[in-house]
Amino acid sequence: MHPYLIGSFNTSISFGNITLTSSGSDDIFVARFDKAGNVIWAKNFGSSGSDSASRLTADREGNLYLTGSFSNSISFGSTTLTSAGSEDIFVTKLDSTGNVVWAKNFGGSSADFASSTHIDSTGNLYLVGSFSNSISFSNTTLTSAGSEDIFVTKLDSTGNVVWAKNFGGSGADKANTVLDKAGNLYLTGSFSNSISFGSTTLTSTGETDAFVTKLDSTGNVVWAKNFGGISAEVVDRILVDQSGNLFVIGSFSNSISFGSTTLTSTGSENTFVTKIDSTGNVVWAKSFGSANYQYARNFSLDRSGNLFLIGNFDGLTATSIDYSNLFITKLDGSSGTTIWDKTFNSFSNSQELAFLGVGIAVQAINFRGGKGKIGIKFKGTAESEIVEGSPFRDVLRGDDGDDRISPGYGKACFGNDRLFGGNGDDWLNGGNHNDWLEGEAGDDELLGGNGRDQLLGGDDDDKLIGGNGADILVGGAGKDTLTGGRGVDMFVGDALTKDVDVITDFKAQNDLLDLRGIFKQQAFSAEFSFVQYQRFIKLEQVGTGVAVKIDADGNGTGTRFSTLVTLNTVSVSELSMSNFVLR
């Protein structure tokens, strides 16, 4: 199979002598390369809004299935799709030369996301993701049982919906998936309270439990099982072998039970590995851990059925804990017996692990140009004022007082504006196009609106909402609440303070946390990003969110981790190094 590259871009992007031009704030690109790295073809798809791609899967004939999300509308060749709600899922089939065969969209009144795709031996596509409220797949409408449910739908090779199912409970539910050669789909993840799969309802024994369920090729639930203890369990990866046996890895603290086997952690957080046969019975379960922390980040199977785990652990000495240590463990897949175990202490420069990826910052925003001419410049007084600009490119400053600053409502278009709140508790709305909003002092509320916006909260406790487009949000000082909205957003954490920001809608598929302001300091220096990520960043599951912790003094001992930001409605297992911009 030839290498492919997918992503999103703004304005234009070049692949060799092929240049693509976007039709909106962010377009999707797909490029095919030969084995020497030369571009064969490149295509882009988009509309006036912000669009993002999440998965690309190929069938045996070389056809490509591209999935992602969009708002408003998006065009694939001569087919234009229109969203039903704030953000819909799209699926499009391309032939081996990049031509559009068909394109479909699915959605409801809220934002919907596709997390994984699988193709069976006859060319059927299985699409898995999450939704809230309701979502429609052709003539089938699914309704969520809680704040967020899992959906699974099967499409035939022509894009027709064969069936669609949803599974969930009262909380937010998401799943990792794998497809076996017989067309059975396995779902695994974590849940709290209870979750239903067909007529089977699972009830957690602790804070959160792990679940595994098997669906046949018609979408019927074959079996569903849960495993847990008194604390929170996190499922990270799932694999299936040629015989239909499942291997699941994750993390736990205190204890966790798999059938009649109970594992007990030796430290604060340990790794579990379990093998489950095709009928849902536990074959074996093992745990691995050190005195404090051990975390398996990935695993794989070889042709002989041996299992390989890779991850990191804390290396203990009399005076320090080093989170940059790597372990690789080989297990006998039939029994779970350890064949060998290797550790590598304090990563050297030659030990970068490429498969983890690295976050790449979003493109800088162009605040120049835009429709119309230069607008007005205005500076307020010490009073509380309502400031409305022109349809053009305005510079509006509130100065003192609690001000409301926005472009000219009722106009045909708005320009690329620069809005400054000044002192006081201000409300700023950028409207359309690419805007710069700066709250400065006071508890401010900043709304980017449409376009690519940069929002800076400034001092005190601010609320930042990016809106549509690929936005950049900087909370600044104080306890800030940041919401990216649609598009690929980048949240900037440039300093550790006593105040912890909250990101309400971090999307692991494409959002970014920019830590360059912290990691440019000498104390955090390392030649490779992977070393920085391993040594100085710790992700901790807190309820339905993740606390991102940074080694406060940068010495890599792991003794002074401080929380920088909390990411709501996301799990540790969904995040990877590709979500973090370090240099």
Image (spheres, helix red, strand yellow):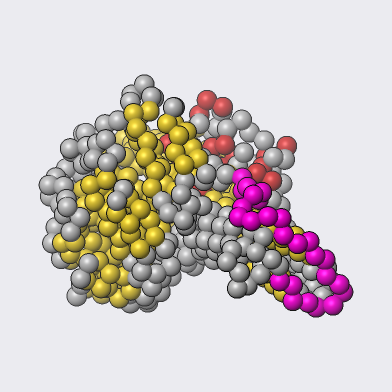
Query: What secondary structure do most residues of the magenta stretch adopt?
Result: loop
Viewer-proximal residue, 572 or 288?
Answer: 572
Q: Is residue 243 left or right of residue 343?
A: left
Instruction: Kindly tell me whether residue 520 is visible in this rendering.
Output: yes
User: What residue occupies the far right of the structure in this picture?
Assistant: 382
User: What residue occupies the far top of the structure in this picture?
Assistant: 36
The residue lying at 79 percent from left, 69 percent from top is 398
Instruction: Kindly tell me whether residue 223 is visible in this rendering.
Output: no
From what the image shows, is residue 279 above or below residue 516? below
From what the image shows, is residue 128 above or below residue 347? below
The magenta segment is 364-388
The residue lying at 46 percent from left, 42 percent from top is 21
Asked if residue 369 lies in the magenta stretch, the reply is yes
Residue 410 x/y as whole percent: 60, 73
The residue lying at 57 percent from left, 36 percent from top is 529
Asked if residue 401 lies in the magenta stretch, the reply is no
Residue 492 x/y as whole percent: 63, 53
Residue 582 x/y as whole percent: 60, 42
The residue lying at 52 percent from left, 44 percent from top is 11
